[in-house]
Amino acid sequence: MSGSKVMPQPTRTCVNWPIIWSISLVLLCAPGSVYAQPGRDKEELSWDRNVEPMFRRYCYRCHNADESSGDVNLAQDEDPGRILQHQRTWSTALDRLQSGQMPPQDEQQPSHDQRRIMLAFLQETFASRDCDRERNPGRPVLRRLNNIEYDNAVYDLTRLDLHLGKNFPPDPTGYGFDNNAEALALAPAQVDIYYSAAQQIVSALLAERGKNLESVDAIFDVDETGLREFSTQHGLAAEEPPDRQQARVALNRFASHAFRKPVEEFYVNRLLQIYDQGRQQQDSYDVALGHCLTAILISPSFLLRIEDDQPGAIGPYGVSDYELATRLSFFLWSRPPDEELLNVAANGHLHEPAQLRAQTLRMLSDRRNRALVDNFFAQWLDLRRLETHQPDPAVFPEYDAQLQRAMRDEANLILLEIINEDRPLTWLIDSDHTFANARLVNHYGLPPIASETPIRVELPDRRRGGLLSSAALLMLQSDPARSNIPRRGSFIAGQWLGTPPPPPPPGVPPLNTEEQGQARSLRESFELHRSAPTCYACHAKIDPFGFSLENFDAIGRWRDTELGLPIDASASMESGEQFDGIVGLKDYMLSKRETVLEELSRRLMIYSLGRGLEASDQCVVDRMVQAASKSEYRFSALVLELVTSIPFTYRQNPEY
């Protein structure tokens, strides 16, 4: 099966050492090498002589294989060439060094000059990556369609809303998304499931045949024009019976759509053997053709996103236009390419930057872009849990399905506005309006409106606006009966800023919310809890975010008091930065917009490629952030930079 190789080939035992030595010398001597050696001509920035002993003295003591404080092991990168392979970890270390958070205040501190040298070394190391020469597309992946993609593909082929994927086993996730190649294996048990689903699809087609459903009849019927066009392009044997000629054209057309590229003649001939057997058994034309449709629907070329290898190719090569169309369409729409995109691919123009950009912008403005909201943003921001999260009815009896739907609609419409109208991504954090109906407006304490459907609502202050202060996100990061300070803080630190805390250690005592029989506020309880040395290191990084959101209860409703006392929503970061309440948090997050943008870019890249990121992918992430920053943080800038990148438009053979 062409392009189906996914595992590396066995290691060759015959090595051409002279060639390897030559390549090594070229890499060592080449200017702008990916692993440059900053400071090699400056004594103070010499890694071996000066810098490494500083990191060993001030950092490795707590960040090594045996004692990886914060789940960070810096000592594993004693070879400075490895720092770029773990750039994200070292970028965090640089930020901590710069802000004075590392080493902790109770540890021995480097002098001012030592800190300056450590910072300069890391900054020069990061700058040494030559992104202009970086052409690594990353490891090739082979992934099956997930359940949502499967249903969309079936609908596009048949125009029948069957939703069979909802009855399949749930898709596992990898790196936070359910379209990850490593998670989407094709097990033998799933083949049986897909075979049963294919039979159901064909049965539905046969049942709807002749009921004036143009989409169904078009699968089986081929008019004279269709026969003539096919004969011009492929040829039809004159001695072939008319029904077999019609079956040939119909199968070629259906298989090409199903496989997302032109199907080869030998495959159609194999399908026709199935058709012939059916006819010999006195099956009607429709039933015999249905057997062939079943075979197409259980083919790996339909169920898997297969890309062809280039035998003998060394290094990266561009994917075909059809493969690029499939990458683009499943990224933006979670479904196969439409006719326009396939036509551009058929003409061989999709790989041209202008055409690729034009098609991307067209697809971003199409209503099918809703898939980005439902499948990318909803997983990144945990919005899918909205359907199953249930607040405690004894504490919040006013919460019901209508309020849940209003919360969901608000979040979806905020995201759709950012995509459809190409609004700044900073609107995720803060904006001067939201989308609400009468029920949600009442929940927010805003001036009443009469609309039962969500409409744009201008906001009187900054307590609302953006997703950060939406009821949906606030509720999902709460417990059923109360807000949850560390969960909210961890969500912001991890999902928005890319610095998730490590899992809590075993044996953490439960939160004590009482003192001598008197209830404490949640903040008082956590201040006491995090005062323990074993807890403080992590809580100090996440609790400030949670404290600033304490004016919102567990269903995202504003409150000024808790237990009859005024709520303290002030927060202080380890770096000394302070902010108060949701408005202060929004200002803080806006000041970190580049960090938020970088994390969004990383997540978007993982989602689009179906794999975890590699060290070389950081170049693309950096370009995405730069492109968005230059275009007022427009979402389209991120996407355009991503879809024209080497990892998105190139691949390499598995053995390399």
Image (tube, rainbow, N blue to C red):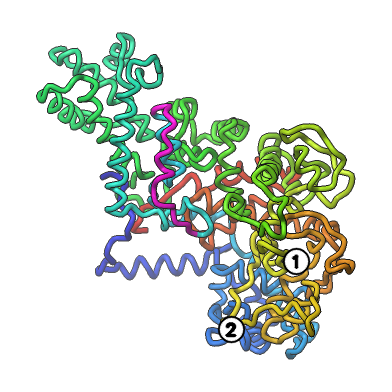
The residue where tag 2 is placed is 507
| Residue type pointed to by label 1 | Gly
In this rendering, the count of numbered labels is 2
Cα separation, mark 1 vs mark 2, equals: 23 Å
Whether the magenta-drawn stretch holds residue 167 is answered as yes
- Residue 206 percent coordinates (x, y): 30, 24
The residue where tag 1 is placed is 546
Main secondary structure of the magenta stretch = loop
Q: Which residues are magenta?
A: 158-174
| Residue type pointed to by label 2 | Gly
Residue 37, compared with residue 260, is above or below; it is: below
Q: Residue at x 78, y 78 (%)?
A: 527
Q: Residue at x 46, y 39 (%)?
A: 324
Judge from the rendering whether residue 539 lies leftward or rightward of residue 376; answer left or right. Answer: right
Whether the magenta-drawn stretch holds residue 217 is answered as no
Judge from the rendering whether residue 265 lies leftward or rightward of residue 180; answer left or right. Answer: left
